[in-house]
Amino acid sequence: MYSKLFELLNIQKTGLETLLKVINSQREYILLNGHEKFLDTVHRQEKSLSYISNLKLLTLKEFERLKLATKKTHIKKISELIPFIRVTERKKFTDLVNRIKFLWELIQKKSRENRILVTKTSSILNRSLRTLKSYSGDHGGYTKNGNHTSGINPSRRVIDRSI
């Protein structure tokens, strides 16, 4: 199970430990510390921001505000993105984070019952992680003259429309 998660998240062991530590401490956010490709610390990769904008999570004005904010600050928490996400989409985004937190808690339990439950829900977890992972990377954006680009390899893009 863990090796599959490592593969999905493409993170080092320390990054995963940070993720578990934060979730286990019952905080309301997941640290991106150690996750090179997880949201790529947002401020360093405007293409991640372009993708969020393309998903229509942000209006153009909100997108410009987010670009400005990320140049000034170092966003480390998923929750720090929430104020920039359009109000109608915030619940969907928060639900996704909460679902992952819930499934991680199940993984931590040692009883046989919960291990069976985790096996049954692992596909939900994998889908959720893929969806969050799709927020990062080069998924296209807009050129200076306003034309849309499809990104490096649009066929490899993973978007879960069911969430």
Image (cartoon, grey):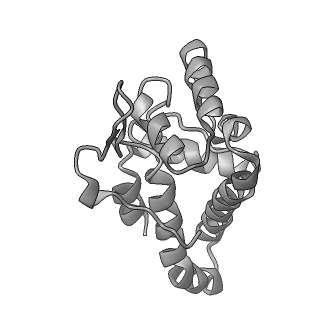
Residue furthest top in the image: 72
Q: Is residue 115 above or below residue 8?
A: below
Q: Which residue is drawn at 37% across and 65% down?
A: 4
Q: Residue at x 62, y 41 (%)?
A: 58
**Near-viewer residue (157 or 149):** 149
Left or right, residue 11 beside residue 24: left
Residue 107 rendering spot, x and y as whole percentages? 58, 69
Residue 132 rendering spot, x and y as whole percentages? 51, 54
The number of discs equals 0
Q: Is residue 110 above or below residue 14?
A: below
Name which quarter of the figure residue 76 lies in.
top right
**Near-viewer residue (126 or 59):** 59
Q: In this view, does 42 lie above or below 2?
A: above
Q: Which residue is drawn at 74% across and 54% down?
A: 88
Quadrant into which the N terminus falls: bottom left
**Near-viewer residue (150 or 115):** 150
Residue 9 rendering spot, x and y as whole percentages? 41, 53
Q: In this view, does 72 lie above or below 40?
A: above
Quadrant into which the C terminus falls: bottom right
Left or right, residue 153 beside residue 55: left
Residue 101 rendering spot, x and y as whole percentages? 66, 59
Q: Residue at x 28, y 44 (%)?
A: 151
